[in-house]
Amino acid sequence: MMGISFIKRLVAITLLAVLVMVAAGCGEEEKGPFRIGVMESVTGAGETYGTVAVQAKQLAVDEINEAGGINGRLLELVVEDSKCNAQDAITAYNKLTDVDEVKIILGTSCSGAMLGAAPLAEREGVVMFSGLATNPDIAEAGDYIFRTSLSDATVGVDTGNVLWADGIRNLATINESTDYAEGVRRTTTAQFEKLGGQIVAAESYPTDTTDFRTQLSKLLNANPDAVHVASQAEASGGTILKQLRELGYDGPIYADVVPIGTTALEIAGEAATGVKAITPDLDPANAKAQEVLAAFKEKYDYVTLPWFLGSAYDNIYITAECLKKTGDDQNADGFRDCLYDITWSGTIGDNYSFDEKGEVVGLANAVLEVLPVAERTEENGGYRVLGAAPSN
Amino acid sequence: MSIASAPIRGLQEVARDPRSWWRRSKGSVELWANLIVLGWALVFMLWRGGGFAVTVGSVFAIWAVLAVSLNLVVGYTGLLSVGHIGFFGIGAYAMAVLTSSASYEQLRTEAIPTFGWPFFAALPISVVLAGLVALVVGIAFNRFRDDIYVLVSFGFAVIAFTTFLSWRSLTRGAFGIHQVARPAIGPLVFDGELEFLALLLVFLGLAVLISWLIVTSSFGRVLTAIREDEEAIEVFGYRTTHYKLAIWVISAMMAGLAGALLASWSTFIDPNSFVLLESVLLVSIVILGGLASIWGSLLGALAFVMLEEGMRFVPFLPSEFIGQIRQVILGILLVLLMLFRPQGLVGRFKL
């Protein structure tokens, strides 16, 4: 009998101890880290973008945590892969919201993935905040959906304006059949035609094409003043530039950001010299931007897609600022209101904010020109900035 | 072999003589495969809780309908097709185009027609359309056998994907289609994830039932005979081309059903979901589970989904590489399985 009551007492004491520990644990939870979901397409079609985005975000988080966190609390990222398609984005989204119980999700880099998860986020009141998705449809995705990336529509409109201002009247276009490249092509064409220009030939190609000579010959047979290239993969963009010159075309070439990426320029070599690209770009005079690029290079030993990198990096600091204000990572509504109110100066520009659709305002596209091979360095990325794109 | 007969027979025997269990089970890979996959699924559900389990369950149900349908062609009839994703896509796009009611800003894309049909009106159309395309394609495919069959079905998958991507005035190309309708019966709308999962499971049950009726019928026995020796069964006076065409169309219609369900489940589709790689993945699910076994297809789909989703919880991975490492591990596991168990988890027949 003694034994039993002793055991009973032991059990009671143990239970009490556990209770105290649990209670203490609950108390401590208040001071635990802020948990934020990150959903990027680190595998699949958009892996370059997704990887850069995750790394830039991790860089910013490390900086914040080393500096003592947000109001003394650390920031913690829960990273999931959305694989660049809608279905995987939905599972990744549900994992983040159900299992990790985050209310704020940063990402994604692929527009298709973003559009897949956005209706759920909108219905469940979860903030989705992307630094890279550019599909114009995202503007209409809802009240909880934000981005710092510029819609393809703005790139296209600015490209149309630049073409017209440069005296181009007959244009030939070639684009990859993806939502991004197709979006750039369509908005460019629409703006260019609105101004009075004429599209004399248009071709499109599926992802992973490697030989464009037949299609390019068709374009050149129409005698265009200029050729516009919109691609999603750097390899195809670079190859198009190269093959255009090989076919003997020596007129002006305009492009989106992809055909002047590091890999594309390596493929194209001298053929890329003089190509103009209309895209958001980091301001070389912006000291903060140079600092971020240097820190990124130091940590990961490479730099690519500097603007997107900076955009993803800024997302974390904006998030930190809003968490400082709301003090609660479960308060999605407060976070959303904070985003609507915020005006931010960071890596990708000064004094930018969000309009009522969650679209970024206050950022402009730049016109870039590719330098000759001899003048290309890692620092300048192989191009120089001619200035901001003319606004109509 | 009928559905699940092996486990049921095993259970009956164990019930008669409980001690025989260990003796029987020690060497039975099949039993262990069942126990491990089902056990893991159960643990996962309890461990990760309702919400996410429902999502994973929905993904499983869609893959399972696809796997069961493909097994009819690959496992029972012996026609190795990697083109099934095409019919999946046709079903999905038919559902999306017919039920979407989204309005798009026309500057950016061509106007696509919107019909705004309800789910249950569009469902039969999706299924029949996939069947019709399969009928036309199948007549051509019937001229081929074995390795060449793989190649032409590969071609079909590529053509289907390119069509989804390039027929912009109907599919909106790479932009995808938004606001695909969720099913509704009168006032009851399957809006929540749990209701939708229930609906998916009903359709999965239907697909399994149809498959079971087929493979246990005399029709199913002719199919198996075609797989074993097509010439021999022709000698007995069977027009094998008719049989092959029939099962091809039935299987494609079931894939179309899975596609329609997927479109409604995710409410947004774009061509990225119907790339060739997914088709190869689907064939691996069927082989992983076991050819010519309906239960094998269910188990294969469950094992695949559980592997893929379970990998999300592998601890101590650096966050930057989490996605890549998951895919590498998944690939290695599949290779190992094929190496040591080429007939699949519960299959009897090797490709």
Image: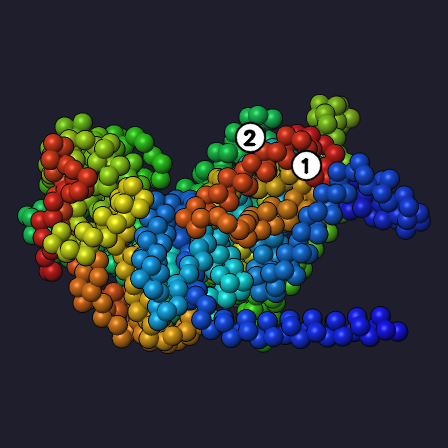
Residue at image position (54%, 71%) is A25
For residue A81, say whether it is visible.
yes
Cα separation, mark 2 vs mark 1, equals: 20 Å
Q: Secondary structure at mark 1?
A: loop
Q: Secondary structure at mark 2?
A: helix
Residue at image position (48%, 39%) is B276
Q: Which residue is mark 1?
A: B344
Query: In the rendered structure, which amino acid carries the disc numbered 1?
Result: Gly
Q: Position of residue B59 (x, y in %)?
A: 57, 54
Q: Using residue B182 as the reference point, say whether residue B225 is left or right of it.
A: right
Q: Using residue B151 as the reference point, say whether residue A383 is left or right of it.
A: left
Return the residue found at the far front.
A2
Return the residue found at the far right.
B16
For residue B203, say whether it is visible.
no
Chain letter for mark 2: B
Q: Nearer the viewer, residue B135 or B68?
A: B68
Q: Nearer the viewer, residue B236 or A340?
A: A340
* B190 over A95 or under it: above or below: below
* B271 over B57 or under it: above or below: above
Q: Position of residue A126 (x, y in %)?
A: 43, 69
Residue at image position (79%, 38%) is B28
Name the quadrant containing residue B240. top right
Query: In the rendered structure, which amino acid carries the disc numbered 2?
Result: Val
Q: Nearer the viewer, residue B222 or A104?
A: A104
| Colour pattern | rainbow
Q: Earlier in the sequence, mark 2 or mark 1?
A: 2
Name the quadrant containing residue B249. top right
Chain letter for mark 1: B
Q: Quadrant of the N terminus of chain A?
A: bottom right
Q: Quadrant of the C terminus of chain A?
A: bottom left
Residue at image position (38%, 45%) is A47
For residue B150, the mark is 2
